[in-house]
Amino acid sequence: MSVKLQTKRIKAKKDLKTSSKKFYIESYGCQMNFADSEVVASIISKEGYDSTRNLNDADLILLNTCSIREKAETTVRKRLESFNKLKRSNKHLKVGVLGCMAERLKSKFLEEEKIVDLVVGPDAYKDIPNLLEEINEGRNAVNVILSKEETYGDINPVRLSSNGVTAFVSITRGCDNMCTFCVVPFTRGRERSRDPKSILEEIQNLKDSNYKEITLLGQNVDSYLWYGGGLKKDFKKASSLQKKTSIDFAKLLKLVGEAFPEIRIRFSTSNPQDMNLDVIKTMASYANICNYIHLPVQSGSNSVLKEMNRQHTRKEYLELIKQIKNLIPNCGISHDMITGFPNETDEDHNQTLSLMKEVKYDFGYMFKYSERPGTFAAKKFEDNVDEEVKKVRLQEIIDLQQSHSKFRTKQYIGKTVEVLIEKESKKSNSHWAGRNEQNTVVVFPKKSHKIGDFVNVKINDCTSATLIGESID
C-alpha cells in the first residue's frame, strides 16, 4: 500500500471516529446471534459509531442473520427490500449482512441483494473496522473466513436493548456434530471453547453492573472443553498435563456456580449425546443453577434419528430424561422437534408423539423440515414428505405440546415460586413479568417491587405458557 493511500485511510478513520455516526442492528435466529450482535456493537462503538433504535437515524444498518431454515432467510430478504426507500433517500447509508446467512452465501450475497454493501461471517467481526473503511471508500466488502480459535473472548460485549437484569455469555463456538439437516457446522465452523478465565471475568463485569442472571451460551455447551486453546477435535493431541488440567462443562458450571452464588445461572443449548451425569449432579448441587434444561431430541423415531445422524437413540434419550428427573425432580425440560424429515412415515411420526407423551415437556420449539443447501440431507435425501402432510403432523405435535404445557403449568397452582422480575407484562402495565427457575413466565401485580428483584410468588392460575399469581414478600 502506498504512503499516500495509507495516509488517506488514517485520515478517513480519524474522521469516522469523530463524526459520531450511528448504527442500527437487528438480530434473527438463535440466542447466539443476539449475543454476537452485542460483540459487534462493542467493535463498532470503538470506531466512533453510536447505537440507535431508529432506522431513519442510522448511517449503518446491520442484519445478523440465521440460515437454519428457509423461512428465516426469506424473512431477511424481505427486510432488506424494506430498506430500499431509506437508501434512496440517504445516499450515505450503508447496509451490512452478518452471521450465518452471510457465511453461507458469501460474495454471492452482493450479487443477489444489490442493496447490500457489507457481508461478514460469524468469525470475522473483528475485521469490521477494516471493512468499514472499504465501504466508506465506495467498495463492497466481504469477510467470511472461519476461525479455529475462540474469536471474541477478549471483547466486552455492549448489551443491546438490555433490561439490565439478564445477559448471555458465550462459552463455545461452532459445532462438530454434523447432523444431516443442519447448516450450522458450515456457517459457524468447528467446535472451540473459550478460556474459563475470560468467562469468569465477563460474568464479574455483569455482576458489578448489577445483572442478576446469566445464560452460558453455545451451539452445544455440553461439549465445552478447555485445555489451553484449539479445536475440540484436536484434544487427543494435547499433552498429558493439558489433559489432566482440562476443564469440561461440568467443571466450568461448578466454577461459575461457586464464584457467583448470588447470580442465577442458565445454559443453552445441550446435546443429548454430550450431556453427562456430572453436569446433572452439578446442577443439583448448586441452588443458583436453574433447574431447567433445553434438550433437543428432533424425533422420537430411531430410524429418523439415524438418518439425521443424531448420536443418540430413543432409548438413550429417555434414559437421560430419567436420570435428570431422578436427580432433579422439579427440572423443567424443553425440546426441539422436526417433522417431515425425508422418508418419515406415519409410524415414525407416531413414535415422536409417543415420546412426547412419555416425557411431557414443559414447552418446545417445533418445525417442519426445511432443506438447507449444502447439508448432507440436501445432497443425499429427497425432500419427499408432502407439504400438506408436514403441516398436519406439525399441528398434531403443536397441539400435543400445548396440552402438555398446560399439564405442567397446572402443577404450579397453589405453590410458591421464586421469580426474577425482568420487565412489565405485555398485557398489563400494572403487572410485572419474569421467569421462575424452570424458565416458565410468571406475571403478578407490581406492588412495591422493581425490575431486578427476586420475588416469591404464589401461583393462583395459569395458561399453557404463563403462570399467574401474587407476590407474598
Image: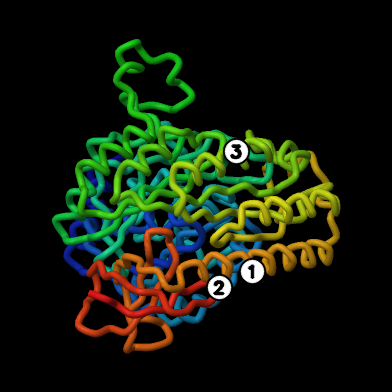
Q: Residue furthest front?
A: 414
Q: How is the image coloured?
A: rainbow
Residue depicted at 20% across the width and 54% down the height: 262
| Residue neighbourhood size for the residue with mark 2, other residues' Cα within 10 Å, grouped as few (<14), some (14–19), many (≥20) | some
Helix, strand, or loop for circle 3?
helix
**Which label is found at residue 166?**
none
Q: Disc 3 or 2, which lies upstream in sequence?
A: 3
Left or right, 59 with respect to 317, comes to: left
Residue depicted at 73% across the width and 53% down the height: 354
At which x and y percent is residue 60?
36, 67
Residue depicted at 21% across the width and 49% down the height: 261
Helix, strand, or loop for circle 2?
loop
Residue hosting label 3:
319
Image quadrant containing the C terminus: bottom left
Q: Nearer the viewer, residue 152 or 8?
A: 152
Helix, strand, or loop for circle 1?
helix
Residues at badges 2 and 1 in contact (C-beta under 8 Å)?
yes
Residue type for callout 1 = Ser
Residue type for callout 3 = Glu
Whether residue 57 is visible here, answered yes or no, is no
Residue type for callout 2 = Ser
Q: Disc 3 or 1, which lies upstream in sequence?
A: 3
Residue hosting label 2:
464
